[in-house]
Amino acid sequence: MDLPLILLYLTLVLFGWMNIYAASISEEQTLILDFSTKYGKQLLWIGLSFVLILGILFIEARTYEKFASIIYIASLFSLFCLFIFGKKINGATSWYSFGSFSLQPSEFAKAATALALAKLLSDKQYDLKLIKNQIKTFIIIFLPAVFITLQPDPGSGLVYAAFFFVLYRENLPVYYIAIGLVAIVLFVLTLAFGLQIVLTCSWALLLLFILYLQFYRKISLKFHWLKIVTLFATISAFIFSVDYVYNHIFEQRHRDRFNILLGKNTDTRGVGYNTNQSVLTIKSGGFSGKGYLQGDRTQGHFVPEQHTDYIFSTVGEEWGFVGSAFVILIFTMFVLRILKLAERQKTTFSRVYGYGIASIFFFHYLINIGMVIGLFPTIGIPLPFFSYGGSGLWGFTVLLFIFIKLDANRSYEL
């Protein structure tokens, strides 16, 4: 097994627990093994993670490829059954409740989807450049995302967009990525500057591009006018749809967060309170931080639910810029190590799965840290191995150690 990757995992889990301890400790709660506290429960879940790891490593590597489809279908079934048997917590029906114990199946669905995608793309006859195969691939990715978004948990559903990095590695035509990026840019610009300005600028840029092709590059567009008209119509329709999506599909809390992010509104007491307090808490740490367990804003619980999605603000206050940079460095080394191991795999299945989990981890830590420092709107994406929660910890552990098992047995043959 790859020792550097395991050491990076242990470093993240240990440092994550230390910050959960700092964010949830009080004067009445000082015993580390007090399992009625949040840090005590997290310690228990960490201990159970090692049992989970042993189970994953004892299973033969080829089993994960053989049963990838069954695991994926079982995962979809668990997500669907939430609408019947699930428990609503914080407005989302994302949990199964077993007495005092709750389980969030969406955290395990990411591993199941990564396995299913790897199984599909590992078929030697599977050409991702064919439209019919692209449709199959998109269905596998978006089915769990749709179930999760309908809970509603749009933040967790958005994570599945990370799989497009995998598809790009496996030769998905680059224009899909380009279309996605253009759509995001147009959406944000339309919200920021209004429909008329963005529509006018888009048409002007398209006309300039056509003139460039026609007169500078000497490319004849004589037989492509239908495609050009379709392109203009599609972009215009998308820009016009932004207003409808924003006002009729987004909930008010989502609109408020976008307005704050775009600078249209200033709200430090309502929807923007958490983010504002998080930013102030991180800034107060300065260069070297106030010291472990010495963060007065953390100890004063200025940031609501700081032990979950906003756990990075604890790092910023108590460990400062140095500690924050250390966490980002460790996460970056962690993702790069997975990518390096993925490239040395001898089977397409293992390589695709490796890229899948690297993309998920990268997406999680990029969006979460960006959210905590106010670069992105709050969408409820946890920081892997740092945010409080047993389902999240176990889900990320399963993701990682299936790959570690595949890498340790990378020469296996079915």
Image (cartoon, helix red, strand yellow):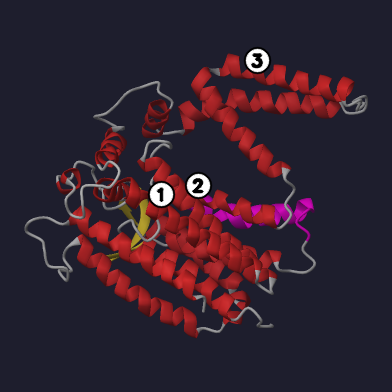
Above or below 61: residue 85: above
Q: Which mark is residue 158?
A: 2
Q: Amino acid at mark 1?
A: Ile
The residue where tag 1 is placed is 381
- Residue 218 x, y percent position in the rendering: 92, 25
Q: Amino acid at mark 3?
A: Thr
Above or below 307: residue 302: above
**Quarter of the view holding residue 263:** top left
The reply to whether residue 309 is in sight is no
Q: Amino acid at mark 2?
A: Leu
The residue where tag 3 is placed is 200
Residue sitting farthest toward the left: 28
Q: Which mark is residue 315?
A: none
Q: Is residue 133 magenta?
A: yes
The segment highlighted magenta reads 127-152
Q: Is residue 396 magenta?
A: no
- Residue 281 x, y percent position in the rendering: 25, 40
Q: Nearer the viewer, residue 353 or 231?
A: 353
